[in-house]
């Protein structure tokens, strides 16, 4: 395997799960920002934005699922890094 292919494979396997978890987190936050925040006008104050209890619970549930996905991505990245280091050592030892 050429060096470029090895670097590309290592990059894809190691960092792709983490990048997907980060992208999913940003998508969830944008979705909640634009679709789930209620607004009310209060005289003397102006427009006030807030979450209801159900919406806040839903946001916490989504963020906890994304935290588990990010932790899984970290474990996968660490395992992939270890596997790639082992394959590089085996390839250079002979």
Image (cartoon, grey):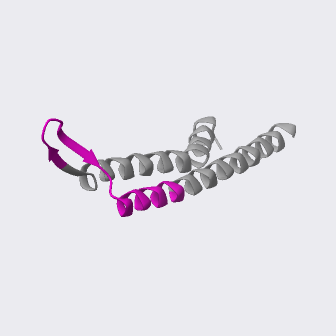
Whether residue 14 appears in magenta in the rendering, the answer is no
- Residue lying furthest right: 93
Q: How many discs appear?
A: 0
Q: Is residue 54 left or right of residue 37?
A: right
Image quadrant for the N terminus?
A: top right
Kindly identify the residue that appears in the image at 68 percent across and 51 percent down.
Answer: 75
Q: Position of residue 81 (x, y in %)?
A: 71, 44
Q: Is residue 2 left or right of residue 42?
A: right
Q: Is residue 59 above or below residue 89?
A: below
Judging depth in this view, the residue of 59 and 91 nearest the camera is 59
- Residue lying furthest front: 44
Q: Is residue 91 left or right of residue 15?
A: right
Q: Position of residue 60 (x, y in %)?
A: 47, 56
Image quadrant for the C terminus?
A: top right
Judging depth in this view, the residue of 60 and 82 nearest the camera is 60
Q: Is residue 18 left or right of residue 74?
A: left
Q: Position of residue 67 (x, y in %)?
A: 56, 52
Which residue range is magenta in the image?
40-65
Q: Position of residue 65 (x, y in %)?
A: 52, 59
Judging depth in this view, the residue of 74 and 51 nearest the camera is 51
Kindly identify the residue that appears in the image at 12 percent across and 41 percent down.
Answer: 43
Whether residue 63 appears in magenta in the rendering, the answer is yes
- The image quadrant of residue 57 is bottom left
């Amino acid at each position: 395997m050429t060096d470029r292919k090895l670097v590309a494979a290592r990059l894809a396997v190691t960092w792709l799960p983490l990048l997907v978890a980060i992208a999913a987190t940003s998508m969830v936050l944008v979705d909640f920002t634009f679709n789930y925040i209620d607004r009310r006008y209060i005289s003397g104050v102006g427009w006030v934005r807030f979450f209801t209890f159900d919406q806040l619970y839903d946001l916490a549930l989504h963020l906890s699922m994304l935290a588990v996905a990010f932790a899984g991505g970290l474990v996968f990245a660490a395992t992939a890094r270890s596997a790639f280091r082992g394959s590089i050592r085996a390839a250079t030892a002979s």
